Amino acid sequence: MTDPLLTAAQINDYLPEAYPAAAASGISCEEIGEHTATARWRFDETTLRPGRYISGPTMFAVADTALWFAVFSVVGIEAMAVTSEMSIRFLRPAKDGDLLARAKIHSVGNRRIVGTVEIWVEGDPDRLVAVAQGSYARP
């Protein structure tokens, strides 16, 4: 395994400048590796749906941001790497905890980077709440 192009701390320092809404929503980069990144959404009771469910849009946002972070693992920090397509499948309700989203890059082309994301509630990584797949346009 080679060293990543950058660290999670570098991404987290960059995030408020490049994507203030994500930073303000409690999303951060937990770790970054070779063709992978893990994002965290910090639990916020003010954003919950009835029944204390974490909303689908919140899960989608953390998945999309995790994939963006993973793109950084292959191209470096690049604000203009943008989502070109993304879909998500919700597997079960997410409740009462931070969300973790691990993105993995599967294909790096001249124009597009493709990957998948697995999402779970902290403490239960074997019980996925959603899976996503998507692609980013290369800058």
Image (spheres, helix red, strand yellow):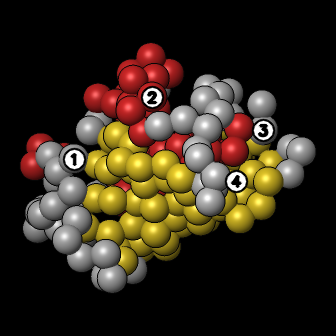
Q: Are marks 2 and 1 in contact (CB under 8 Å)?
A: no
Question: Mark on residue 135?
Answer: 4
Question: Mark on residue 138?
Answer: 3
Q: Is residue 36 above or below residue 94?
A: above
Q: Are marks 4 and 1 in contact (CB under 8 Å)?
A: no
- Between discs 4 and 2, the one toward the N terminus: 2
Q: Is residue 81 above or below residue 31?
A: above
Q: Residue at x 54, y 53 (%)?
A: 33
The CA distance from mark 4 to mark 2 is: 23 Å
Mark 1 residue type: Arg
Dot 2: what SS? Answer: helix
Label 2 Cα neighbours within 10 Å, binned few <14 / some 14-19 / many ≥20 = few
Dot 1: what SS? Answer: loop
Q: Is residue 50 above or below residue 76?
A: below
Residue annotated with mark 2: 10
Mark 4 residue type: Ser
Q: Are marks 3 and 4 in contact (CB under 8 Å)?
A: no
The CA distance from mark 2 to mark 1 is: 19 Å
Q: Residue at x 10, y 49 (%)?
A: 45
Dot 4: what SS? Answer: strand
Label 3 Cα neighbours within 10 Å, binned few <14 / some 14-19 / many ≥20 = some
